[in-house]
């Protein structure tokens, strides 16, 4: 069987074109949209993502202010920066990059991000709005999975979807988004006794656990659609996903590549969120 490649470049380009036009309109009558990107780690995969965000923002006419607090930053240092940026009228949007220093809890510190500026939807308030079906910013990676599936014409209503990973950044919010699309959702995780038992019956499998090669051909039913959310550092310094693409190819009906699948759509959606936050702030 031929396994289709669910690339995200075309979708990302369309989203970016719209964002660039809207950012230019804001700049023409005042100031450009401004994102404060707060960093407190020295993780290579994180550095790669931060760099891609900075380049994307520059291309779209968005100001991206990187604030590196250091990999040993305390919870109070991070909270103080988030409070300051939330109160700063010159900052339209805030993103707190993960991972965080040892002992620092994301839920604890992210609660300091104003919901109107929480463009990656990570705070407890933003996640609560999502779970309640109310308006708010949705975690960009989770949103990217749904938008990528829709872009490629893959139906969600009534389909069995297994999400491998239960983080507040991807797995849990993605489950909420999929439920809103009327999919039937199973969430698997590191303590799932038999991963294959819950993934092989699924029409769609989303790998979002942050482990190289976690999902293999034995975890996939024939003709399943596989979305790889993983961004892990390979031995050669490159970025690889959570799916063993070689063993899945030829068995799955479709697979999103890493890089080039969910990643560019995630970045594009995050930039769109920044523009929306700026538009809302200027209303």
Image (cartoon, rainbow, N blue to C red):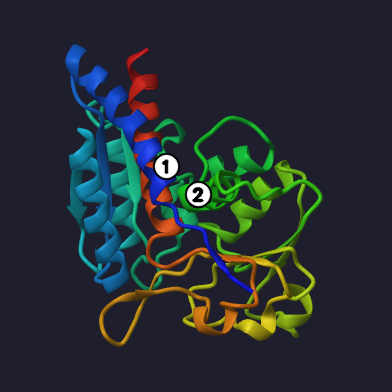
Asked which secondary structure carries label 1, the reply is helix
Instruction: List x then y, in percent, for residue 165.
Output: 60, 68
> Is any part of residue 158 visible from this angle?
yes
Q: Residue at the far front: name it.
A: 1
Quadrant including the C terminus: top left
Query: Which residue is nearer to you in this view: 15 or 79?
Result: 15
Query: Which residue is nearer to you in this view: 118 or 236?
Result: 236
Query: Going by the image, does 66 lie left or right of 159?
Result: left
Query: Going by the image, does 73 lie left or right of 125?
Result: left
Earlier in the chain: of badge 2 and badge 1, it is 2
Pointers 2 and 1 in contact (CB under 8 A)?
yes
Instruction: List x then y, in percent, for residue 144.
Output: 50, 49
Asked which secondary structure carries label 2, the reply is helix
Instruction: List x then y, in percent, for residue 239.
Output: 34, 73
Residue at 62 percent across and 46 percent down: it is 153
Number of numbered discs visible in the structure rendering: 2
Instruction: List x then y, in percent, for residue 59.
Output: 20, 40
Residue at 27 percent across and 48 percent down: it is 37
The residue at which mark 2 appears reads as: 144
Quadrant including the N terminus: bottom right
Query: Which residue is nearer to you in this view: 79 or 195?
Result: 195
The residue at which mark 1 appears reads as: 269
Indicate whether 8 appears above or below 2: above
Q: Residues within 10 Å of mark 2 (few under 14, many from 20)?
A: many
Q: Residues within 10 Å of mark 1 (few under 14, many from 20)?
A: many
Residue at 25 percent across and 46 percent down: it is 56
As measured in the structure, the alpha-carbon distance from the residue carrying label 2 to the one carrying label 1 is 7 Å
> Is any part of residue 43 visible from this angle?
no
């Amino acid at each position: 069987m031929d396994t289709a490649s669910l690339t995200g470049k075309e979708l990302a380009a369309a989203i970016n074109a719209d964002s660039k036009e809207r950012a230019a309109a804001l700049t023409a009558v005042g100031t450009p949209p401004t994102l404060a990107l707060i960093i407190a780690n020295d993780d290579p995969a994180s550095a790669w993502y931060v760099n891609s965000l900075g380049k994307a923002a520059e291309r779209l006419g968005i100001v991206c202010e990187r604030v590196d607090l250091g990999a040993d930053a305390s919870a109070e240092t991070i909270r103080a920066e988030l409070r300051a940026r939330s109160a700063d009228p010159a900052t339209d949007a805030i993103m707190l990059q993960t991972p965080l220093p040892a002992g620092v809890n994301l839920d604890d510190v992210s609660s300091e991000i104003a919901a109107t500026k929480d463009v990656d939807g990570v705070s407890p308030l933003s996640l609560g709005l999502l779970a309640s079906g109310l308006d708010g910013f949705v975690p960009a990676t989770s949103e990217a999975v749904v938008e990528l599936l829709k872009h490629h014409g893959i139906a969600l209503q009534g389909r069995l979807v297994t999400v491998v990973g239960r983080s507040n950044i991807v797995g849990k919010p993605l489950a909420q988004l999929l439920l809103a699309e009327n999919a039937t959702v199973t969430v698997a995780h590191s303590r799932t006794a038999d991963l294959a038992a819950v993934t092989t019956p699924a029409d769609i499998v989303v790998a979002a656990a942050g482990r190289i090669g976690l999902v293999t051909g034995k975890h996939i039913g024939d003709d399943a659609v596989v979305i790889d959310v993983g961004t892990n550092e390979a031995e050669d310094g490159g970025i690889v996903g959570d799916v063993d693409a070689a063993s899945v190819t030829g068995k799955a009906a479709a697979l999103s590549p890493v890089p080039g699948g969910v990643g560019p759509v995630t970045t594009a959606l995050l930039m769109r969120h920044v523009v929306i936050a700026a538009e809302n702030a200027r209303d």
